Amino acid sequence: MSNAGFLKSSIGKKVIMGATGLFLITFLMVHCFINMLIFFQDGGETFNKGAEFMGTNWLIRAMEIVLFVGIILHIVQALVLTLENRKARPVPYEKINGAANSSWYSRSMGLLGTLILMFLIIHLKHFWVVSRFTDHIAHNEYEKLPGQETLFKEMMEVFENPMVVLVYVLAMISLTYHLLHGFQSAFQTFGLNHRKYTPIIKKTGIAFSIIICTLFASMPIAMHFGFVK
Amino acid sequence: MGGTTGKNINVTVKVWRQRNKNEKGSFETHDMKGVSTDMSFLEMFDVLNERLITEGKDPVAFDHDCREGICGMCSMYINGRPHGPKNAVTTCQLHMRSFNDGDTIVVEPWRSAAFPVVKDLVVDRAAFDRVIAAGGFVSVNTGNAKDANNILIPKPEADEAFNAAACIGCGACVAACKNGSAMLFVSAKVSQLALLPQGKIEAEKRVLDMVHQMDVEGFGNCTNTGACEAECPKSISLENIARMNREYVFASANEKK
Ligand code: HEM
Ligand code: SF4
Ligand code: FES
């Protein structure tokens, strides 16, 4: 007798979760750096160049496919794990004092993930669908055809709506908490728990989650209130 | 330690009653008057049961054996935590001084698909035994007792193996985990052997077989909340889970199949 296959085992599934999660984290870094170009205060010229590069470079386009596969794997695996975990406790407790032994966000990864997913759908519709599947987006101000906008202008327009800004900010708060647990959790899943390195990983995870999500959230806020020219 | 408070308190105990595995259970409420705060939690249940027996009623079934924190039998989920409000103790080591006058105390069995309720607070933890039987051993011809220090083991490894071996198989980790995962228990049992030269030889097969059995038993998947470590009466470390993950990944990669 032996194992029914690594990917079907509980640990195998967790490794997929962690690997896709960490991959998504590297994507977040790249995405955040590029988007920070809006703060050049040059009417989006630098940002539009960055967006054009991301939209046309073959390596980035290939990575976009990997990214989608990664997100889908992460979501499917999250669903499988969550359903299995529900089955593992068919009769619920009458009284649970979860705060005594774990953080609320570590116990709410599925919920936080679902909020992120809902945001992702809205977000992709706002920018990805418009720039990939319509002729609405021009690479820059000079090549603009009538009726077209640059991606920068499109952002400015989308973030005029305060409700949209609110949704983005709430989503970034969800992402912060998802990563506060997820970042260090992925290393534990890979078997990296070490007296010397784990405290560093944990601190890096906290700093990463807060910094990246605050930067992301600052973009719709800044555009809405006219801090970006 | 041991300071006598000599106080008596009144508490209300709301306890799960279930006749057998198949019948649906429900909560039953009992007023306990004048409970000495020096009593252990199990002694409070003894008093309750004496009363129930005198009244001609069925006493509350609960597991217990050593009553000194070493056998792991005393499974009770008390006010939302396995083994009650104190860290790193079993129910038998919990005293009524940890409660206040007028408290309502909710007592439930471990809730896990892999630990079916036998009666009231007693659950069947044979799933743990089957995990151990799948690989939690060293296959050696034991023969005569060997001299101590025949095989030299560095002190840090010996200590770590010893800490893992402190697991008493109580199942509080499963009970505490929101996913009903048995990773802390299984990883302690994998680690106590994998860390020592005698156990290393079979380490790969052991981790594959034990994790497989753990999955078959219907325990949930770990999401690293850390609830198990916080509730474990023997403070078994999450490092053991990381070690098991590591061993499992490498053993799967090396598997000749
Ligand atoms: C799109 C919807 C998403 C859903 C439904 C979701 C759900 C989950 C769930 C249920 C877990 C497992 C719980 C745990 O391990 O503690 C998890 C873990 C994780 N997620 Fe997500 N997530 C989503 C998006 C993301 C995104 C966008 C990122 C990163 C940018 C991310 C990063 C992580 C990481 C790093 C882990 C930890 C993996 C591990 O513990 O091994 N997730 N996610
Ligand atoms: S790891 Fe701790 S909580 Fe789990 S069975 Fe062992 S002693 Fe009990
Ligand atoms: S009765 Fe043995 S540990 Fe509590």
Image (cartoon, rainbow, N blue to C red):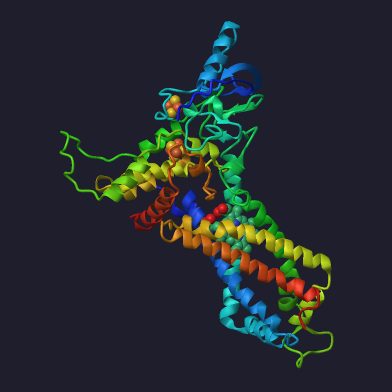
Instruction: Give the side of residue A225 with respect to residue A16, left or right.
Output: right
Q: Position of residue A192 (x, y in %)?
A: 43, 58
Front residue of B46/A59: it is B46
Instruction: Give the side of residue A47 with respect to residue A81, left or right.
Output: right
Front residue of B183/B41: it is B41
Q: Position of residue B34 (x, y in %)?
A: 60, 16
Instruction: Give the side of residue B191 with respect to residue B60, left or right.
Output: left
Residue B116 appearing in the image:
yes
Front residue of A15/B28: it is B28
Q: Position of residue B241 (x, y in %)?
A: 44, 49
**Residue at the farthest bottom position:** A142
Q: Quadrant of the C terminus of chain B?
A: bottom left
Front residue of A134/A196: it is A196
**Where ligand 3 lies, by quadrant?**
top left
Quarter of the view holding residue A209: bottom right
Q: Quadrant of the N terminus of chain B?
A: top left
Residue at left offset 54%, top offset 11%: B50
Residue A74 appearing in the image:
no
Q: Is residue B34 above or below residue B247?
A: above
